[in-house]
Amino acid sequence: MRSFQRIAARGIAAAALALPALTLTSSPAVADPAEETFTPYVTTLESGTSACPGNEQYFSGWDTQRAIEWTYTNGEADDDHVCIRVEYKVPFTSAYCDYQFYVPDRKATGYINFWVSGLHGTGGWGINRGINEYDKQGWYTIHRGPEVTSIKFTDRSPKGYTIGWGKYASLKRICS
């Protein structure tokens, strides 16, 4: 029996030598599972009307760090029309999380009024949060808490400004 074990051990050792060496220096970094980014869904609500003139209601570009999208603010009076809606659908979690929004570098000057909503038990909830992009750039916390399922905003804001967001990843969720 011992000679069989020696032969088997030699076979295993020979097979191990024949395998290519694994190196960890070129393996990709693993993302922190507690941090996720979300891509916005942009919906044009009206276009080519007197309230929302032109064919395009939002535009693409670059700031100093990433691809962005932006739009003109469209007023905040009751009779002003909303031309676009930007929404982030986030998977439900009961974990306590920070929700951070990306403000484009020197490309946004307006106030964004976010509607943060979620689920709790069998009911839903919602709350307004705001950020003035005028003097900001980079990531800013707009909400802290559990059970969020959606964050959205529109171009309803005082006229004469621009609001912007990251084109691919402009909402970040960091959970503790």
Image (cartoon, helix red, strand yellow):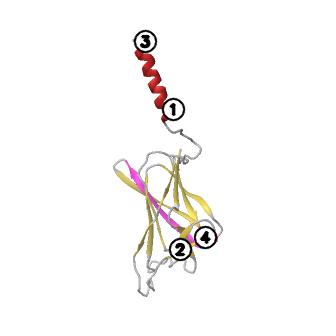
Q: Residues within 10 Å of mark 2 (few under 14, many from 20)?
A: many
Q: Residue at x 59, y 59 (%)?
A: 140
Q: Amino acid at mark 3?
A: Arg
| 44 w.r.t. 90: above or below | below
Is residue 88 found inside the magenta-colored segment of the image?
Answer: no
Q: Residue at x 41, y 52 (%)?
A: 91
Looking at the image, tell me whether mark 1 or mark 4 is earlier in sequence order. 1
CA separation in Å, label 2 and label 3: 75 Å
Q: Is residue 66 left or right of residue 78?
A: right
Along the line of sight, which residue is nearer the eye, 153 or 68? 68
Instruction: Report the residue that reaches farthest toward the left.
Output: 122
Q: Which residue is tagged 1? A: 17
Looking at the image, tell me whether mark 4 or mark 3 is earlier in sequence order. 3
**SS assignment at label 4:** loop
CA separation in Å, label 1 and label 4: 52 Å
Q: Amino acid at mark 2?
A: Trp
Looking at the image, tell me whether mark 1 or mark 2 is earlier in sequence order. 1
**SS assignment at label 2:** strand
Marks counted in the figure total 4
Q: Which residues are magenta?
A: 104-120
Q: Amino acid at mark 4?
A: Asp
Looking at the image, tell me whether mark 1 or mark 3 is earlier in sequence order. 3
Q: Which residue is tagged 4? A: 63
Instruction: Report the residue that reaches farthest toward the top.
Output: 1
Q: Residue at x 44, y 45 (%)?
A: 94
